[in-house]
Image (tube, rainbow, N blue to C red):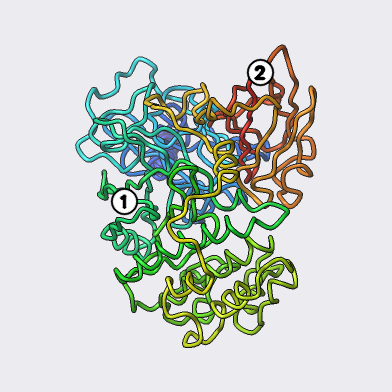
Amino acid sequence: METIVIVIIITLLFTTLAGVGIVFWLLKLRNPGAAGGPSASGPRLQVSVGDGRVRELPLPKRGELTVGRDPKCTLAVEHHLVSRRHARIVAEGQQWVLEDTNSSNGTFLNSRSIMRMPLSLNDLIEIGPARLTVVGLHAATPLPATPPRTPQPGPATGGAQASASRQLFGNYVVVRNLDEGGFGKVMLAQERNGQRLVALKLLSTNDDYIVTKFRQEGAIKLDHPHIARIYDTGEVNGRLYIAMEYVEGVSLRKLIGDRPMALDAALIIAGQMLQALDYAHRNKIIHRDIKPENVMVGPQHGVKIIDFGIAKVLSTVTRTRDGMMIGTPQYMSYEQAMGQPVTPGSDIYSTAIVLYELLTTNVPFAADSPLETIKMHQQARPMPPRKLNPAIPPEVEAAIMRAMEKDQSVRFQGALEFAAALNCPLGQPLPDIMATTISRQSLAVRNELGNAADLQTRAPMAISSNQRTQPVLRVESGPRRGQVITLAPTQVIGRMEIDPADGTISRQHFRLEKQQNNYIICDSSTYGTIVNGTRLQSGAVYPLKHGAQIQVGQTVLIYEYHG
């Protein structure tokens, strides 16, 4: 009897152990990161999002790992510095590639701003407050010598493998970022087989509507001396692009100061704008976003209207996207504010607003919110500009007010009719004093074929005949765009000097100190300072060179000084 009991006990013991083993085996299948699974020893990311906790994510064997504010992302990070679809890591053969997916604030790999780069052991990825460290890779594992058969889209691809010395996109070498807009990213680039510099516009492909609009823009090729030309359109690894004329000069925004512009200069600029619009309208193209930022002015060529990026063939009804209308609220036409079809008169309305601002330093409609500004376009009448600047001739005021009538039938029926009413001196060059001012402000671009991420300054140098001897920071973007900050031998720059409304700028964001014949910069901020695409380490000292680009929060500053 005792023998039978012992046998039963042993049988139950073995059955229990077997059951426990099966349970652990099933759990391991369901959660490979547990109990020494692949995420504990294989290629993975150690993730910290500023709360002190560290968790691990396995790198994908296939497909992608996504990072962004979207809850559907593999790693969802709810933070104002993180875009909805910020970045992704893609498995390509035996390697993993990090890609920035058109984020607003950039993706950083080992403190360097990148667009697309392969990952290596111990790499540090920074996305807003998130820190991702690559672990579990074998340092000696060779990477494929050739690109994968079906490469994913990214500016560092395009038939030539990206190297440490340059970033390529199709037939172009990327020099540096220029701008980021609602329809995509714009970069300064150079043709690989030539010397021509272009403004390379890349499209964010997350929105089918914008894809359609971008393809429409690619078919628009206008040839006019006061319109920036489109050289090339196409697609590289699924990324749509347009190569446009890079215009050397300054935006009209930089020429709007605290005092009204001289009447002769303002009318020459308005006349050249209206000549360009007359040509576009005769070709059944409407710009739809005329504003100072979209008007470049050079000392030689005068006006060049840029970014016909939201132009569409005449008679197409304006569509709203995410509840927003196409156009900029302060310069939006009455029709756009009402959600009605646009006509050439819509561009005339916006041009009148620009001229109003040139002659008064104010826009006729401005409120605390975009919606309130739109309501003013819908309901309010503009203040006559002579009340702000009595020096404006009555006939010029009358023409501006007529061009801003809400009833299109009352407005001028053509751009040249508006120019004639203003008595614009068509065909005249800019006044010498304005051409000289532009020459001093504009940046002459050199023949740059180096890597955009190289720590050496990639911002073009100022024209040598007008080298700046007083050290300054020039504000390139944000609400104080165009402002110049004169530097003392030691100076702390922070939120109040740059943008009081930007909470990502610290009160004492960075310190500048003159040493010998130049300045050094030291970061002391919460969210970081980026110089020429490189994030500075807190407390570290970095020497500045003339033309260095400093990004602080949402603002870009240019350091100018020839010591």
Using a 10 Å C-alpha cutoff, classify the residue at mark 1 as few (fewer than 14 neighbours), some (14 to 19) or many (20 or more): many
The residue carrying mark 1 is: 230
The reply to whether residue 11 is in sight is no
Q: In this view, does 96 lie to the left or right of 489?
A: left
Position in image of residue 415 (x %, y %): 43, 71
Instruction: Give residue 241's position: percent from left, percent from top.
Output: 32, 49
Q: What element carries label 2?
A: loop
Residue at 31%, 40% in the rendered image: 62
Q: Residue furthest top?
A: 516
Depth check: 495 or 146 in front? 495
Foreground pick, 477 / 208? 477
Sequence-wise, the earlier of marks 1 and 2 is 1
Q: Which residue is drawn at 63% across and 74% down?
A: 397
Estimate the x, y position of residue 309 in percent, counting from the top left.
39, 59
Q: Which mark is residue 203?
A: none
Q: In this view, does 140 lie above or below 192?
A: above
**Which amino acid does the dot numbered 2 rest on?**
Gly
Q: Horizontal placement of 477 versus 160: left or right? A: right
Label 2 sits on residue? 563
